[in-house]
Image (cartoon, grey):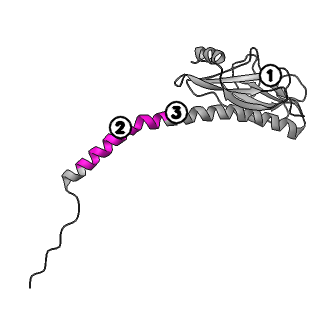
Amino acid sequence: MQQAQRPQHGFTLTELLVALAIAGVLAMIGAPAMGNLLAHVEDANTEASVAASVRHARTAAVMRNTRILVCPSLDGRHCQQDDDWRRGWIIAQDADHDGQPDAEVPLIAVRAAMPTGTDIITSVGRKRIAFHPDGSAAGSNASFTICHARERDGKTVVVANSGRVRLDIADHLHLQKCLAEVP
């Protein structure tokens, strides 16, 4: 008695190569779009990080009932004397009002440098933001314009005297100035 042959299941080598070729073409088409999406997400994350840092400083001032600074820093410990925020900043207590972090108190936060191709400029001459215990910001309104060379756009973080922090679309004048300084 002879057994009936069962049909063979599977793919031929030709079918497999055609499927791989189609997958390769689809991957090549989708890769640039995925790269653009990832770049856009990184830019949005940087903008949100700046706003979050300033909000964190305001909250710390209220919670600790003391003056809190947000200032650019090269060494991650002291406020520098210029307004170059792109290399990073610190959030620190300044109870003695000397414009530098209090030595005996640990820093609240340290933010690393901006990603390559991203710059940040502030209101003219704004070397630091100081929040009072009531959450208000000392001095005049301040703005941080964050720009991205690859996108040619950016956002502005605005800090009102009341201490309110908001993220807004960068105005054309500040954006052009910022983009001119992008490394």
Whether residue 140 appears in magenta in the rendering, the answer is no
Q: Amino acid at mark 3?
A: Ala
- Residue 53 in the image: x percent, y percent? 73, 34
User: Residue beneath label 1, please?
Assistant: 141
- Residue 172 in the image: x percent, y percent? 63, 17
Decide which of 173, 55 is in the foreground and name it.
Answer: 173
Q: Is residue 39 above or below residue 138?
A: below
Query: Which of disc 3 and disc 1 is earlier in sequence?
Result: 3
Is 76 left or right of 63, judged from the image as shown?
Answer: left
From mark 3 to mark 2, how far is it between C-alphas? Answer: 18 Å
From mark 1 to mark 2, how far is it between C-alphas? Answer: 47 Å
Image quadrant in which the C terminus is located: top right
Is 32 left or right of 40, judged from the image as shown?
Answer: left
* SS of the residue under disc 2: helix
For residue 99, say whether it is visible. Answer: yes
Is 38 left or right of 4, judged from the image as shown?
Answer: right
- Residue 163 in the image: x percent, y percent? 82, 30
User: Residue beneath label 2, please?
Assistant: 28
Contact, CB < 8 Å: mark 1 with mark 2? no
Q: Which stretch did the figure color magenta?
A: 17-36
* SS of the residue under disc 1: loop
Contact, CB < 8 Å: mark 3 with mark 2? no
Q: Main secondary structure of the magenta part?
A: helix
Q: Quadrant of residue 114?
A: top right
From mark 1 to mark 3, how far is it between C-alphas? Answer: 30 Å
Q: Amino acid at mark 1?
A: Asn
Q: Amino acid at mark 2?
A: Met
Residue at point 44%, 36% (across, down)? 33
Q: Which mark is residue 39?
A: 3
- Residue 52 in the image: x percent, y percent? 72, 36
